[in-house]
Amino acid sequence: MSVTAILPVPQCFISRRDAVFAPVAGQSPLVRIVRTLQSAGDVVVCAAEPLIDDMRTVLAAQNLSSVRVETAAAPGGRAQCIAAGLQALADRPKGPVLLHDIAWPLVAPALLVRVVAALRDGAGAVLPTCPVTDSIKAVDTGGAVTATVDRAPLRTVQYPRGFDAAVLARLISGAPEAFDEMEA
């Protein structure tokens, strides 16, 4: 069962191109994410139209021109980018899909393995979490700390998230432009 990763790059990054293309430790977030996701399967980058040429140029310069780049329908929000990725997979309406976020360029390889394994074991959706380790404080209306919140039940949700393609297609169907799979 082949895995495909969708990397949406919505129109909000048109004015924040550095978040996509500026090198951090020698690699742009785009390149870093694509290279890591390739270890799990094929990658489809889906972006708002004004970003497409730069996507192809940057990927080609890093010997990643084989990565599929798809243009999202206007207005090019996250929902349209994900829909473009799913459309690129129209020949296989079922199967594991990883969904990433360009704002999170560091991907732990072990996390990829766990998400893919859960999908292959039949999960329809996988939202990987990890315990919150930061101190969490409650504050009053004036901003004064009133208590320390118990972190034990708290988790942060990580990327990539995993879905069966059919499940993700149902979630994205009729979704608002600012789609968040956690709220779907």
Image (cartoon, rainbow, N blue to C red):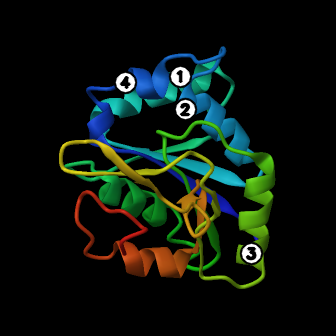
Give the amino acid type for the residue marked by disc 3 in the picture. Answer: Ala
Residue type at the position of mark 4: Arg
Q: Local crowd at mark 2 within 10 Å, few (<14), some, or many (≥20)? A: many
- Structural distance between the alpha carbons of marks 1 and 2: 8 Å
Classed neighbour count for the residue bearing mark 1: other residues with Cα under 10 Å, few (<14), some (14–19), many (≥20): some
Residue drawn at x 56%, y 16% as measured from the top left: 23
Q: Earlier in the sequence, mark 2 or mark 3?
A: 2
Depth check, mark 1 against mark 2: the one in front is 2
| Quarter of the N terminus within the rendering | bottom right
Report the Cα–Cα distance between label 2 and label 4.
11 Å
Image: 58 above or below 121: above
User: Do the numbered discs 1 and 2 sit on residues whose CB atoms are within 8 Å?
Assistant: yes
For label 2, the SS is helix
Front residue of 5 and 128 = 128
Q: Where is mark 2, residue-wise?
A: 30
Real-space CA distance between mark 2 and mark 3, rounded to the nearest whole angstrom: 25 Å
Residue 53 in the figure: left or right of residue 154: left
To which residue does mark 4 refer? 17
| SS type, badge 4 | loop
Location of residue 69 in the rendering, given as x and y in whole percent from the top left corner: 49, 42
Q: Percent from the top left, x then y, of residue 38? A: 72, 46
Give the residue at mark 1: 58
In the figure, 56 relative to 38: above or below?
Answer: above
9 left or right of 93?
Answer: left
Q: Secondary structure at mark 3?
A: helix
For the point 64% across and 37% down, which residue is it?
106
Circle number at residue 118: 3
Q: Residues within 10 Å of mark 3 (few under 14, many from 20)?
A: some
Question: Residue 38, can we see it?
Answer: yes
